[in-house]
Amino acid sequence: MRLSQYFMPTRKETPAEAQVVSHRLMLRAGMIHQASAGIYNWLPLGLRVMKKIEEIVRQEQVLAGAQEILMPTIQSADLWRESGRYDEYGAEMLRIKDRHQRDMLYGPTNEEQITDIFRHSIKSYRDLPKNLFQIQWKFRDEIRPRFGVMRGREFLMKDNYSFDIDEVAGRHSYNAMFVAYLRTFARLGLKAIPMAADAGPIGGDLSHEFIVLAETGESEVHCHKDFLDFDGLAEPADYAANLQPIVDHWTSLYAATDDKHDPDACPLNEDELLSGRGIEVGHIFFFGTKYSESMGAYVQDPEGNQVPVQMGSYGIGVSRLVGAVIEASHDQAGIIWPEAVAPFKLGILNLRVEDQATTAAAEDFYKKARAAGLEVLFDDRPERAGAKFAEMDLIGLPWQVAIGPRGIKAGTIEIKNRATGQREEVSAEAALDLLTA
RNA sequence: CGGGGAGUGGCGCAGUCUGGUAGCGCACCUGCUUUGGGAGCAGGGGGUCGGAGGUUCGAAUCCUCUCUCCCCGACCA
């Protein structure tokens, strides 16, 4: 992509409304544009990152045995009356009337909808287990949206729902998602710690929040400091196997959100306890028969009995993760994207567009980089070198290749790693080899 | 929802107290000079001051109502 043609409205100054660093950087990098409180337009650069995150989330869901579906954003109030949540949910749910004055709502979550799908289709234990997921926009009319996309009212969420014949099978489904989440966050370059959490309005007795530690986190969290040394799961797990050991390992150390944390009952010594703020990026629940009973989702077991299906639901805040990754990875100059979610792997800077030899070399490198399959953003604008460097640092692509007259004379170009800041003068061929290694 | 703050070219702000018909920096356009970490000079385009009503000869400025956004708190993926 040529920057001269790309829609990426960056700015030097930060809009006054943005306070936290991820929000400021997303606005400055031209990733998003606010539409109204807690609702954002996603511009090309921001959308690319969100799509990358979405794809990683999707891949790990599929690996763990979930199947993708897509449910509507607008739901009928009748379903929610069945579960009893139409009255329970409160003002956070955006309620709408259609032209026939029917009560509708913009879904804040989809347990009712999925249960409705399930009860119309699944009648036998032979059809279980099932795990269905979607990546869809949700709306929760937060009293006070803030922190940019990390606490918006409209947000993209991966939510899925497991269906099992009994609690033992249900717990395996829960564990599978637990492990899939560890994998997902590790691939995103995040250290997410599973913490015992309240099940909240969704209900149930088994629930973990996945928390990324960050100063700007929305909630106070407490955990054993050894979690910092835990490694994410590099290899895909065998989801058919017993996953309890992995779950046990990750829950062996103390970790709790503030509402579950009792300083007096805390088993940790002061020097073991890490207290700080965290961003909730995922939340998993096993809630058994809460919805299946109220909404009549029953199957026949091998003995011919009608039994309510055992359910769990699992969420990952996809749009929120864009902000969370930036919170976890940035410096004074701007964003530092982990390669897995970077909008482009490489930025090429033509430092002197007027210089024929420089432009020829830059164009040639751009062509070769694309031919090699690299995702490239090519700054071919007639700007000054300093402005290009600053902007490239701001948008945080993992690698930068600077091509200018100085290097051309020496037969080299400069390649820089955004994360380490390390710069090297090498030949174009060597740079390509390094980037495609 | 309680408390606080702010709405003035695309962005950041001054002007409002002490009414007189809108200004600065950045960005943008043109030209010249510059050119490896957000250049300099010169020229130029763009706003009627969130909205409605009122006071006044005259309102960005005073009064009333209203909308929006932000911050702190309680609540949330």
Image (cartoon, rainbow, N blue to C red):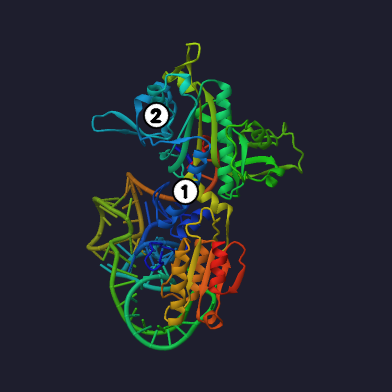
Q: Amino acid at mark 1?
A: Val
Callout 1 crowding tier (Cα within 10 Å): few <14, some 14–19, many ≥20:
many
Dot 2: what SS?
A: helix
- Which numbered circle lies on residue A173? none
- State the count of labels: 2
Quadrant location, the C terminus of chain A: bottom right
* Residue at position x 54%, y 20% in the image: A166
Instruction: Give x and y (percent) for residue A411.
Output: 55, 80
Judged left or right of residue A437, residue A54 is left
- Please check whether the numbered discs 2 and 1 fall on a single chain: yes
Structural distance between the alpha carbons of marks 2 and 1: 26 Å
Judged left or right of residue A420, residue A107 is left
In this view, A80 is above or below A186 = above
Q: Amino acid at mark 2?
A: Gln
Asked whether the residues under the numbered discs 2 and 1 touch, taking CB atoms below 8 Å apart as contact, a structural biologist would say: no
Which of the chains bears the disc numbered 1?
A
In this view, A38 is above or below A378 = above
Q: A301 and B29: which one is in front?
A: A301
Judged left or right of residue A429, residue A230 is right
Q: A319 and A63: which one is in front?
A: A63
Q: Earlier in the sequence, mark 2 or mark 1?
A: 2
Q: What residue sits right under mark 2 in the picture?
A: A113
Which quadrant holds residue A135?
top left
Instruction: Give x and y (percent) for residue B76.
Output: 51, 36
Quadrant location, the N terminus of chain A: bottom left
Dot 1: what SS?
A: helix
* Residue at position x 55%, y 59% in the image: A336
Which of the chains bears the disc numbered 2?
A
Instruction: Give x and y (percent) for residue A124.
Output: 45, 19
Q: What residue sits right under mark 1 in the picture?
A: A149
